Image: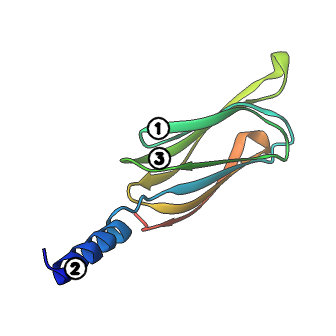
Amino acid sequence: MTAKASIALAAATLLAALCGCRSHHVDATVENRTGQPVRLLEVDYPNASFGADNLPPGADFHYRFQLSGQGAIKVQYTTGEGGHSLATQITGPALAEPQQGRLLIVLLPGGKAEFHPQLSPRP
C-alpha cells in the first residue's frame, strides 16, 4: 500500500469513527416536589424503565437512557406512610427513537406531574 493510500485509509477510518458511532441519549431528571417521600418510583419509557426505591421530599433523581422504539412515558410511585399510602400512575408525552436531549419530570402534590421535554428531533 502506498503512503497516500495509507493516509487516505486512516483519514476515512477516523472520519467514520467520529461521524458514524453517535448514540442518542435522553438525560432525565425526576424532581420530588410532592412534599412527601416517594417510594417505589418507576419511570417506563419505550421498551425499558428506570426508578428508585426512595426519593426524599425536595430530592432529584438523574438517569440517562437511550430510546428504542416509540410510546408514551409513564410514571408510577407511592407516597404516604402505612395505611395512608397513595399509589399514583401518570402518563406523559410520547417519546420516539432517535430523539435526544433532556427530560424533566416534576412530581407534584395530589398525584400530579409536569413533563418538560427538551428533545430533538420533534416527533
Label 2 to label 3: alpha-carbon separation: 46 Å
Q: Which residue lies furthest to the top in this view?
A: 83
Mark identifier at residue 72: 3
Give x and y (percent) for residue 71: 42, 46
Give x and y (percent) for residue 75: 60, 39
Q: In which quarter of the image is the C terminus?
A: bottom left
User: Which numbered disc flags the more N-terminal residue, 2 or 1?
Assistant: 2
Residue 111 shown left or right of residue 91 in the figure: right
Mark identifier at residue 8: 2
User: Which numbered disc flags the more N-terminal residue, 3 or 1?
Assistant: 1
The residue drawn where x is 20% and y is 81% is 3
Q: How many labels does the image show?
A: 3
Location of residue 78 with respect to 20 vertically, above or below: above
Give x and y (percent) for residue 66: 46, 50
Residue 111 shown left or right of residue 36 in the figure: left
Q: Nearer the viewer, mark 2 or mark 1?
A: 2
Name the residue beneath numbered marker 1.
48
The residue drawn where x is 47% and y is 38% is 48
CB of mark 3 within 8 Å of CB of mark 1? no
Which of 20 and 113 lies nearest the eye of the viewer? 20
- The kind of residue tagged 2 is Ala
Give x and y (percent) for residue 82: 84, 17
Q: Can residue 57 be seen in this view?
A: yes
The residue drawn where x is 38% and y is 55% is 97
Q: Quadrant of residue 114?
A: bottom right
CB of mark 2 within 8 Å of CB of mark 1? no
For the residue labelled by badge 3, is the local secondary structure a helix, a strand or a loop? strand
